[in-house]
Amino acid sequence: MAKINDHYQKLTAGYLFPEIARRVAAFTETNPEADVIKLGIGDVTRPLPPAVVDAFHAGVDEMASADTFRGYGPEQGHLFLRELIAANDYASRGVSVDPDEIFVSDGAKCDCGNIQEIFSTECKVAVADPVYPVYIDTNVMAGRSGPADDEGRYEGIHYMPCTEENGFQPDIPSEPVDLIYLCSPNNPTGTVATAEQLTRWVEYARGCGAIILFDAAYEAYVSDPGLPRSIYEIDGAREVAIEFRSFSKTAGFTGTRCAFIVVPRELRGKNTAGEEVSIHQLWSRRHSTKFNGASYPVQCAAAGIYTDEGKAQVKELIDFYMENARIIREGLSASGYAVYGGIHSPYSWLRIPGARSSWEFFELLLETTHIVGTPGSGFGPSGEGYFRLSAFGDRERIEEAIERIRDKLPAD
Ligand code: MLT
């Protein structure tokens, strides 16, 4: 019989969002009349912007004619899209990223999960706690951890607690680490790192030879021009950081699938012989072996984001969700909840009143108000006692949710 990868059996629970969906399905089966409002998974609800749809259609039309039909594209992504990304997402902010350093993919979740493959299983991994579960789970699957303890902390992973005391910003590790996952604006806490905080990370990584895996999937929600949207806005970051971006939360691509990562040419790792190796070359090798490029019409659709109309329409989308986030934040605060995030992020992170656990509050909220959120403990032990609400819903449903909480489950 074929032997399995034993590391998978260390995973303590199913993936968070299917588990939530399972519990909601069980609830609706026994309460078929309940009008459930879903503010759990961060899935967008507004349609693709018209400029994106037009570009998408044009790409499909090209595929429909023998003259313009395309088969396999470049694994790294079409140059027209990579050039637009380099110019609009980086050069426009004074950051130098070459199109050759950009790898287009079918999603940031896959990129965040796959990146660990090019590093040794001996690498010590540091993660914020709470954290997007993909970072940890994929390292556990690869064998970079021992078993989990009773609270769900995997042996061998360096956890960096993010609490009210440290403003939900991880402290620099007290032990040597090799790979550091950072996410700003943060999923799940909704908080954002300042340039000073990121500078400390870049200096630390440069000092000890670590690599920062910087997840900037929510950068479009940063509205304060003084806050960094890319780690490459920090001097020296090109030598120590890989950046993950996504069109999912920016332009409504959760169902369309398109994202990219930036791997600067300066970035180096070390092989067992102690020789320096280009991380860009390794990732390029991995990407071209395991991926055949994102769909051509989808890349055309992504290019539509960078037209003048596309930019204006994407801004409208972001403004819409950020108004939802404001309604959630202010509404919950008025109902007595301590709320964090929700200013440069679509996620609000609330402290659960009383002595309830995150899952107990999940059940209580569902039973009492028929609202679905995400239990903080699903993002790690330090998320226990917290709860995440997403602003990606319809406006009326968000307003309705806040009224239900005010009337049926105020904190005070
Ligand atoms: C979330 O809710 O945390 C995200 O939607 C998950 C994801 O982007 O994969």
Image (cartoon, rainbow, N blue to C red):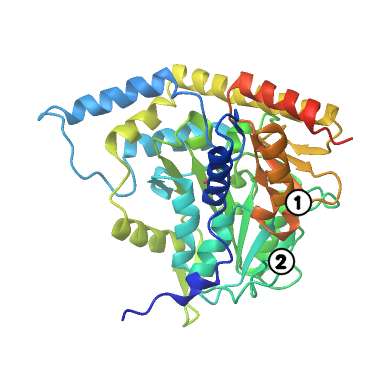
**Residue 258's disc number:** none
Instruction: Assess disc 1: are there few (<14), some (14-19) or many (≥20) residues with their C-alpha within 10 Å of its C-alpha.
Output: many
The residue at 57%/42% (across/down) is 24
Relative height, residue 310 to residue 384 (above, below)? above
Relative height, residue 337 to residue 317 (above, below)? below
Answer with mark 1 or mark 2, whichever residue precedes in sequence. Answer: 2
Which residue is more in the foreground, 217 or 7?
7
Which residue is more in the foreground, 322 or 224?
322
Q: Which circle, 1 or 2, is nearer the viewer?
A: 2
The amino acid on which the numbered mark 2 sits, given as a three-letter code, is Glu
Q: Is residue 70 left or right of residue 150?
A: left
Q: Which residue is mark 2?
A: 151
Q: Which residue is mark 1?
A: 169
Q: Position of residue 189 (x, y in %)?
A: 71, 45
Q: Position of residue 103 (x, y in %)?
A: 40, 48
Real-space Cα separation, disc 1 to disc 2, in angstroms:
21 Å
Q: Is residue 202 left or right of residue 17?
A: right
Element on which disc 1 rests: loop
The answer to whether the residue labelled 1 contacts the one labelled 2, judged by CB atoms less than 8 Å apart, is: no
Residue 411: quadrant of the picture: top right
Is residue 359 something one can see in this rendering?
yes
Residue 77: quadrant of the picture: top left
The residue at 24%/28% (across/down) is 60
The amino acid on which the numbered mark 1 sits, given as a three-letter code, is Gln
Element on which disc 2 rests: loop
Q: Is residue 64 left or right of residue 254?
A: left
